[in-house]
Image: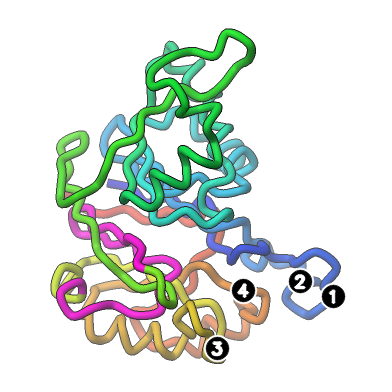
Amino acid sequence: MKLVFLGCGTSTGVPVIGCRCETCSSNDRRNKRTRSSLLVRCGSKNILIDTSTDLRAQVLSSGVERVDAVLYTHYHADHVHGIDDLRSFNRIQSEEPIPCYADAPTIASLKHSFDYIFSVKGSKNLNGWKPNLTANLIDGPFELFGELIVPVNIMHGKMKILGFRIGDAAYLTDCSAIPRESMEIIKGVKVLILGALRNSPHPTHFSIPEAIEAAKEAGAGRTILTHLGHSVDYNKTAPELPGGIELAHDGLVVDLPD
């Protein structure tokens, strides 16, 4: 299994439009962050987690030429608004539908916001080129391409959203709290990917210190912090992190042994 960080930025991306702070003005590519999304390569199959606003640029940059399934964490714009770019993968993959998996609130939001995709299940729009997708409800663990997908309930402020454990990796972005039963699901994973917006507290996201404490409790072999804002300068922050904890950057690839 390979984990490809297509994007590791917060909802604004980094640099932020109109901002001239040190991070936004940096020439270090690790401070150039598109909106958060992860690709999980399982053999010949690609599982995409979230269709970020920057999906087109991300897949071109990372050389991604197929998407076999999509997992959605939640319905906020920076995690879903690249959905239309999935139509290019339909073309590559002989117009086969791409299954999308999400919880009930996210499916309802997708069907409302993108009714041109989901209004008539399985049909093709004769008046235009649209993605050919199916919406599938996540109501517990399920198997996908030989991998067990375990949904992990986490809190995003007052909103309940999903993280995922896939094999020995767990992806929990936009997280402000991990319920006890969810912590038990992710304990001991080899790779934990955890959202950490900035150093100071935030009502709907872990701060870096909070994410570090959660990582310690989870006991992951390696923790990678994602969904980073523009107050996080890679060169200043990375050396200050405890051993076993690091910052993500766009294009980072992590190999997991079988």
Real-space Cα separation, disc 3 to disc 1, in angstroms: 19 Å
Label 2: which secondary element: loop
Taking the spot 36% from the left edge, 85% from the top edge, the residue there is 243
- Asked whether the residues under the numbered discs 3 and 1 touch, taking CB atoms below 8 Å apart as contact, a structural biologist would say no
**Where 119 falls versus 114 (above or below)?**
above
Tag 4's secondary structure?
Answer: loop
Q: Which residue is at the front of the view, 91 or 251?
A: 91
Image-quadrant location for residue 186: bottom left
| Residue at mark 4 | 229
Q: Is residue 143 above or below residue 6?
A: above
In space, the residues marked 1 and 4 are separated at their CA atoms by 14 Å
- Region rendered in magenta: 160-182
Q: Position of residue 58 (x, y in %)?
A: 58, 44
Residue sitting at x 34%, y 80% = 177
Between circles 4 and 2, the one closer to the viewer is: 4
On the image, the x and y values in percent for residue 56 come to: 61, 38
Q: What is the CA distance from the residue labelled 4 to the residue labelled 3?
A: 10 Å
Q: Earlier in the sequence, mark 2 or mark 3?
A: 2
For badge 4, the amino acid type reads Gly
Estimate the spatial distance between the alpha carbons at disc 2 and disc 3, rounded to whole Å: 16 Å
User: Which residue is disc 1 drawn over?
Assistant: 20
User: Which of disc 3 and disc 4 is earlier in sequence?
Assistant: 3
Instruction: Tell me which amino acid carries mark 3.
Output: Asn
Marks 2 and 1 in Cβ contact (< 8 Å): yes
CB of mark 1 within 8 Å of CB of mark 4? no
Please tell me how crowded label 4 is: few (under 14), some (14-19), or many (20+) other residues with Cα within 10 Å. Answer: many
Q: Which residue is mark 2?
A: 24
* The quarter of the displayed image where residue 101 is located: top left
